[in-house]
Amino acid sequence: MIGDDIAAISTAPGEGGIAIVRLSGNSVIEKVEQIFQPYRAGIKLSDKEGYSLSLGWLCDEKMEIIDEVLLGLMRAPRSYTGEDVVEINCHGGTLPARRCLETVMRQGIRLAQPGEFTRRAFLNGRLDVSQAEAVIEVIRAKTERGMNLALKQLAGRNSREISLLEDQLIEVNAMLEASLDFPDEVGDLDYSVAQGKLREVKNRIDKLLLAGERAEIYREGINVAICGKPNVGKSSLLNALLRKEKAIVTSVPGTTRDIIEDYINIRGIPVKLRDTAGIRFTEDLVERIGIERSQEVISEADLVLFILDVGTGIDQEDREIYEKIEKKNKIVLVNKEDLEEKNISETELEQLFPGVKIVRGSIIEETGLEELEESMEKAVLSGQLQSDDMEVMINLRQKNALLTAKRHIEDSLAVMGKVSLDCLGVDIWGALEALGEINGKNLKEEVIERIFHDFCIGK
Amino acid sequence: MIYKAGSYEVIVIGAGHAGCEAALASARMGCQTLLVTMSIDHIALMPCNPSIGGPAKAQVVREIDALGGEMALNIDKANLQIRTINTGKGPAVQALRAQADKRQYHLEMLKTLFNQKKLDILMAEVEDIELSAARVKAIVTRTGARFECQALVLTTGTYLKGRIIVGDISFDGGPGNQFPAARLSESLKRMGLRLGRFKTGTPPRIDSKSVDFSEMIEQPGDIRPLRFSFISPLINRPQLSCWLTHSNKKTHQIVMDNLDRAPMYTGIIKGIGTRYCPSFEDKVVRFSHKDSHQLFIEPEGRDTDEMYVQGLNTSLPEDVQIEVLKSIPGLENVRIMRTGYAIEYDIIYPSQLKLSLECKTVEGLFTAGQINGTSGYEEAAAQGLIAGINAALQVKDREPLVLKRSESYIGVMIDDLINKEIEEPYRLLTSRAEYRLLLRQDNADLRLTEKGRQIGLVDDNRWMAYQQKEEILEVESNELKFSSFTPADEEMAEFLSYKNTAAIRDRVSLWELLRRPELSIYDYVGKGWLRDNDPDILEQLEIQAKYEGYIEKQKEQVKRFEKLENKMLPPDLNYDEVYGLSQEAVQKLKIVLPASVGQASRIAGVNPADINVLLIFLEKKRRK
């Protein structure tokens, strides 16, 4: 039911300066008033206007203080959800926010379902489809870079990229339709012009899809496996990267043969780093389990860091490990370059790992780490767009719509000149319809507008 | 002094293309019908271009025919040239176009009206419509005659408060300097209807004796002229040509030099004109980069010297019109016979109508044609037919006929009129039809004859012809699908190589083989694989086989489209109580009162979020 009162902790779980409990519904203001004691006596919450702040204490039924809070008041329809909204800014940390939430829930305000605020905003006409989707992306974004992308979409960046596409496709369609509806005035369709325009549209869609994939990498992050024989420096590498980023989210320690997982942030990309136990044939049961799990980690990895020891040189064990990762996206790190005795030569590396990115350095002395990070970013984003000129986020629904549009355009390119123009129109309309779905627009109407604008028509 | 003049089941006001169809449909369906016209001498008048058909319009004319209307039969009797245009662009956009003999068109229609049982014709100006409790009760003429009726069809064309403008001269008048319907607008306003004001225009007519045709390109008719009606006899009469010439820089300079005298720019014209039928001065201004515009010189009849200058509709002063014409090759010594003019007239915003074309607020009042904001003879006739049918159905206490977007151009048009905000005269285009590959001129009978029969407008003669055609199509298409050939068949191999197309690799049916562009259905007839049927049947078989893939694609789209069309909205739904609708959507939905969620989705101002809200609302109601 829309309109009943809902509440949720809107800030991310974990430690922070403040936390926000957000409430929305027809009678949230009245309900909060019952449990709010303002600093300045005599001030009534229900008399306050929208976009106002009130400082005071949130209390329980017995008027015992729960927390000192700042209340933000937004009145319908000028609020995020379009309903009356109260935001309780309480002290940070899990406990105060939970206690505030429990207190308001005892006033007959129910816990919101995931995404319910956004759904209400959408249903109350506060957001269009792609904006609503972008809000969900904001909530899910894992690093700041992902956050920027999501914010740009909110500001209509996605909508702009899509309207450019729409515009080009409408133009081709208008050329075709004008030649069909006004044959006396417009004449025949110029195939080569139409083809050129359709190809442009297709390229644009391809670019958008690639940019979307890149955004997905920033949002969803990647799995990186660290491989190498014992004592080659796997744990040190892990620690060095962690130290450098100071962005530990979780750390799951275990025995030496367990997989060690850590989340770090490399150049804005959320990375799940996983150390593997040594990979070699063994009779030891415990170690064998470790090896099986290592293989699993490798198969799940988007990128593998393979570490060599410049002191020991490349031995049989290294070769065996390399066989397991040969087909993966990988970087070879030659470690311990601080040692005097170097037993790995450039020619050897080139021979054994043709075309593979090689980084030389010393984890202990923290040399080569910059280059390693840069190489990791490049390896992950290869193929995707490097430049920042097209920052978009594409969710599954939008991606499907783009793929459908692309398929229709490819169909029209394939049949152009081979089928009659009315049939060609079916494919081009299919593309228009798919693109229109992204922003909920009827593009056919705009085609007709364009015909009248671009062509001199009339008896 | 108002006197009791009589009583009819259905009265039709106006006898243009909409009014004639409405009156004939109503009378043919068995209702005592009165057709009231300002001038019996101008029944079925073509006051603008002398042609019927063209893209989207030809399809409509065929749809009118399939339902049992008159336009197709009438133009088949009264044409002076027939052409199929858009040949080679595909069956969905191929369209028949006829040049009409305007006088003959009027006379043939008059004959049909006179011969129609249960139909009376009266010349009068109607000045009032009487209601009784929001229901139509009677009409009153200017001379005091009061006729009672159960249903009323209003087809006032451009007569409603018509005003003619030529340069700085303007006066009240209907098309061709007739009397306007001066008083009826007030009566409509008193009923609470919202009126708007539109503008259209027409070019000058010139004396063919003063034209030098040697300077122009001849456009003859087709060698084998086709018919509009599925049941007309073959057309076999000499055809007249049209002529193509062009304006030039000098012409455009004359226009530019006289813009200060053009009522479009001086502000004398306030009505809203069309973008697809702009005046010549508008074209010159808006497309100033074009040095030349096409002009077609078209005969207006076999017994007249008047010729229509297509492309030159204008309200410039008469002396400027002459100067403009004389700058055009072939028209150096031209003599004007009728001056071009613009005309402003009142319309009813069509969002006030139901899909049956009945007013939402006045029971028994139907409107059709230019009064609903459309332009074009064909668009008018189609609405007249539907309004006449639904007036008669209402008198008989039967459900109205509403055609879907997925089955006809008529459905596309009426749905557009009611759901869009019509801000300029509306014209049908093939690009307005989402499923145009299914809405072809060749299959209009297959789409609509049965509906026409159900409502009682398709007579036995037409019905039998249709059933026979349907049966032959079924038999012949099955035969083509079941007769197949293998690569081993020598006759087939020889035929394919003769036709310069690849040999077959697997067993293949004649139906499938027909998809190859190199092959035609007439090749099959030539080989004796198919009977030499009527050309209509052969064409139908060929289109169905050749375009099967795309036709199936569109049928799939129709299925998806109809999902929302079949989600009906209760007529008494209180949109104020649907929580979550945007304010704009509530306003629009309350005005339009859509029949289905599908229709709601096409209303301007109703966005996808509102549709989601409606769907959620319906689902909640269903679960209760």
Image (cartoon, coloured by chain):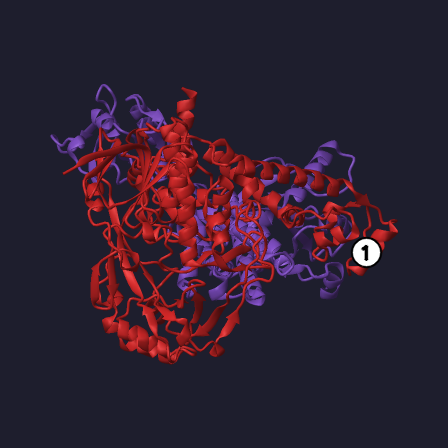
Quadrant location of residue B616?
A: top left
Q: Which residue is mark 1?
A: B495
User: Considering depth in this image, is A83 or A22 the residue closer to the camera?
Assistant: A83
The chain coloured red is B
Query: Viewer-proximal residue, B333 or A153?
Result: B333
Q: Position of residue B526 (x, y in %)?
A: 76, 53
Expressed as whole percent of the image width and height from the top left, the position of residue B524 reads 75, 51
- Side of B221 where B12 appears, left or right: left
Considering only vertical position in the picture, is A292 above or below B232? above
Residue A117 in picture, x, y percent from top left: 36, 35
Looking at the colours in the rendered structure, which chain would you say is drawn in purple? A
- The answer to whether B437 is drawn above or below residue A108 in the figure is below
**Mark count:** 1
Q: Chain of mark 1?
A: B
Amino acid carrying mark 1 in the image: Phe
Q: Secondary structure at mark 1?
A: helix
Res. B382 image quadrant: top left
Name the one closer to the observer, A273 or A344: A273
Q: Residue at x 81, y 56 (%)?
A: B495
